[in-house]
Structure formats: C-alpha cells, structure tokens
Image: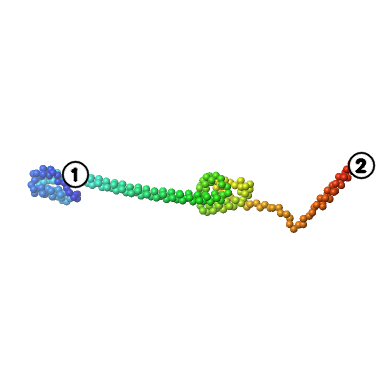
Amino acid sequence: MGKEYIPLFLDFNETTQDLTDDECGRLIRAIVAYANGDDYYEAFLTGGEKIAFRFLKGLVDRNAAISEKRAKAGANKNKQEQTETNENKTDQTETKSLTKTKTKTETNTKNQNKDIQNKFDQFWLAYPKHQSKPQALKAFTKINPDDDLMEQILNAIEIQKQSDQWTKDGGQFIPLPATWLNNSRWEDDVLPPTTRKKTVPAQDFPQRDYSGVKDEMMDSLAAEIEAMRSQEVG
C-alpha cells in the first residue's frame, strides 16, 4: 500500500496484553509489512498474534482510506486554487487586452475624426455657398471620402463654379452644400459655359454720312403737303 507511516493507537497495549514481547515484535513486523504491501506471513503468527493482527489491520485500512481521502481533497483544493489563479491571470490578460484595444480604437477614432474635419474644412473653403454648415458636415462625415475621392470632389467644385447654373443670377441656383453632397453631385457631367458673342462695330468698311439724305426726305415731304393744301383750296 506504500504508506509512509502507520498509527500505533494507545489501546495497543490492551489489544496485545496477552502476548509476549516476542509475539508483539512479530505482530508489529507483520503490520508494517502489510502497510507496505509486502508479504507479512500471517500463517506463521500464533493464534493470539493472528487475532491482534486482524484487529490492527482494520485500523490500518481505515487510516489509509482517510489519508487517501484527505490527499485527494488537498489535490482538488490545489487544483481549484491553481484554476482560479489561472482564471485570474486570464481575466487580467483579457482586461489588459480589452483596455489596449479600446485605447487603440479611441485613438484611431480620434485621428479619423480629425482627418474628416480637416477635409471638410477644405471642402467648405472651396464651395461657393456657405449655408447649413452642420448639415453639410453630417453629410460629409457620412461619405468619409478618401484622398482620391476628396481630390475628385474639389476638382468638381472648381469645374462647376464656371457652369451657367452656378454663375447666373448671382449664383442663386447653386445647391446647398449638404444637398450637393447627399446627391453625389461631384459625379455630374457639366457642360462648358455658353460663349456669348459681343456686338462689335464693323471694321474695314467706310462710314457713310446719311445727313443729306435725311434733308432731302424732309424737303420732299414738305412739298407733298403743300401740294395737297393747294388742291383743297382750289
């Protein structure tokens, strides 16, 4: 059974009181051999020794069972403590990981918000109509343009600034910035502005003087009127 010790109870003397010292010695040897799992040669014990041996063997068995139960309980306790320790370490590691992830996420969000604000400031400066800025920022944030799209937006604004719609009537037909963004108006096909021809005086042609013709027409008209009067009088 391999136990490190066996108990020798105080009532041992009462159990072995009818045995001689030699018999007690053989009895103790037999009990130790039994506890160690060795051959104990019970057949070589005398009658009184056998009776005492069987009694003491029961005590050894009960003590071994108690010791084994305690050992298992101690092992389970140690295992549970180790498990709790490992769980605590895992919780701490997960907490640190979550904290690190949260901090990284907050940093990324902060940088992203800063980038969006910087790009929106560029848009707002380029767009010719400055109205409803909060709505425009909300629409711009929803789009969250990358560098390529941002370049496309700014180029579209510069082109559309020259269009007839945006230049006529003092720019009153320019869409609100939020409307322009929500409808992806940077993708519009814009016609080039209409070229208006200016009236230019004819060149390389001599200028005629019509003052004499006017005088002749007035004299002719006066003569006709005078003739009509004469006929009426006659």
- Taking the image as shown, residue 203 lies to the left or right of residue 8, namely right
Left/right placement of residue 111 relative to residue 127 reads left
- The residue to which callout 1 is attached is 62
First in sequence, mark 1 or 2: give its number.
1
Residue at position x 8%, y 47% from top?
20
Residue 112: % across, % down: 47, 50
Instruction: Classify residue 91 as left or right of residue 217.
Output: left
Q: Residue at x 15, y 50 (%)?
A: 33
75, 30: nearer the viewer:
75
Give the residue type at disc 1.
Arg
Of the 4 image quadrants, the one containing the C terminus is: top right
Q: Residues within 10 Å of mark 2 (few under 14, many from 20)?
A: few
Under mark 2, the amino acid is Gly
Q: Position of residue 109 (x, y in %)?
A: 45, 49
One can see residue 199 in this view: yes
* Depth order, front residue of 83/53: 83
- Residue highlighted by disc 2: 234
Residue furthest top as drawn: 233
Q: Which colour scheme appears in the figure? A: rainbow
Local SS, label 2: loop
Disc 1 or disc 2, which is closer to the eye?
A: 2
Cα separation, mark 1 vs mark 2, equals: 174 Å
Q: Which element carries disc 1, helix, strand or loop?
A: helix
In percent of width and height, residue 226 lies at 87, 45
Q: Tell me what residue is drawn at x 23 percent, y 45 percent.
A: 70
Left or right placement of residue 177 versus residue 195 in this view: left
